[in-house]
Image (cartoon, helix red, strand yellow):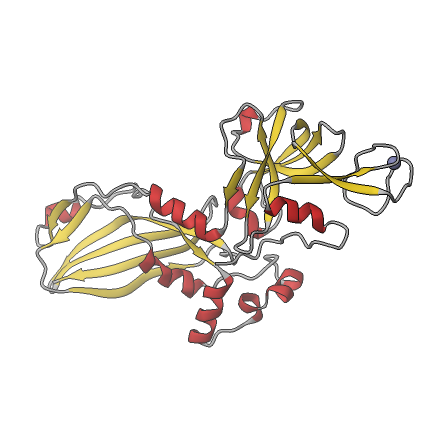
Amino acid sequence: MSTNKPLPTATEISAPFWNGLKAGRLTIPQCKSCGHWIFFPRRHCDKCWSQDLEWKEVKGTGTLYTYTLTRIPTLPDFADEMPQKMAVVELDEGVRINTTLIGLDEGEVKVGMRVKPVFDTVKSDGTALLRFTAADKDFPSRIDSTPAALAAAAEAEAEPAAAKRQVRCDDEAAMKALVSDTFSPWSNQIVVDQALIDEFAKLSGDDYWIHTDPERARKQSPFGGTIAHGALVQVLQSRLRIPLDFEVVGFTNMVNYGSDRLRFPAPVPAGSRIHAHSRVKSVEKLPKGMQLTMEIVTHVVGSERPSVINDLVILYM
Ligand SMILES: [Zn+2]
């Protein structure tokens, strides 16, 4: 699994900081001449200009200097993190660090609050980001947010299937009673990563750069990065298990008639997690059997606008 979220590029000067995070340690440079702590990492002390610096591990405790909540993703890739809680934390050593807050409800975030570090592994090679949470929160100091780990966690959280009501397909009244304006609970979540998009591009022959060239898409795409093919997200509905509280029984044949309506209202940026929910939109008794139209709506997790709307038509015979 991979993500196209921009990740830090370690330079010769900053590498000790990023390597420390990978190991769950916060290290920052200190001036050996005057004792001043330095951040961001650089070659000289910004107080006395000495170049005699030393990397030191610090506890990472500090106070929240300021923050902002972003309601619109700073890049489409961050749609699954809404609202982003972007913050500046002042460490007890006096340096300020740009960061994001985690494990806090919006109402719990207060300027001046005590905070502690959270080392968040975001990539399978161990790349970690430094986030912060409230000092008095019972929140792990190291977490795994790699797309694979997030998908596995969502899977584990999915509610066990409740006993399903059985509805006979030839019972017109019972079938029509399934029609509802209310959507089912959400399905499991899956990650639509660049590798999957590349596979689909190969299979379908649609290898347009907006899907397959992250570097060009970052610069030229209106979406700020690559996006999945609408058709790919549509077929991924097969991997999403939507918890329905009924089961149609009593048919000898079930035919997928295609779609009455298929729309792709919002893009799915590479690296997004998606999930779906559905409702029975209509039921019609036809001479050959009972026709059921199921509205299946797929969203990027956390995004209000649907990515795929599919009115799937099924005929029970
Ligand atoms: Zn100094």
The quarter of the displayed image where residue 220 is located: bottom right
What x and y, as percent, mark residue 292? 21, 55
Relative placement, left or right, of 252 versus 208 is left
Residue furthest to the bottom: 205
What x and y, as percent, mark residue 252? 9, 63
Residue that appears at 73% across and 49% down: 14
Q: Look at the image and tell me whether residue 255 can be seen.
A: yes
Residue that appears at 87% across and 33% down: 34
Q: Look at the image and tell me whether residue 300 can be seen.
A: no
Relative placement, left or right, of 90 versus 51 is left
Q: In which quarter of the image is ligand 1?
A: top right
Relative placement, left or right, of 138 versus 49 is left
The quarter of the displayed image where residue 316 is located: bottom left
Quarter of the picture containing the C terminus is bottom left
Residue 2 or 279: which is nearer the viewer? 2
The quarter of the displayed image where residue 256 is located: bottom left
What x and y, as percent, mark residue 279? 28, 47
Residue that appears at 53% across and 39% down: 142
What x and y, as percent, mark residue 313? 25, 60
Residue that appears at 28% across and 65% down: 258
Residue 182 or 79: which is nearer the viewer? 79
Residue 129 or 69: which is nearer the viewer? 129
Residue 154 or 30: which is nearer the viewer? 30
Q: How many marks?
A: 0
Is 245 drawn above or below residue 95 in the view shown?
below
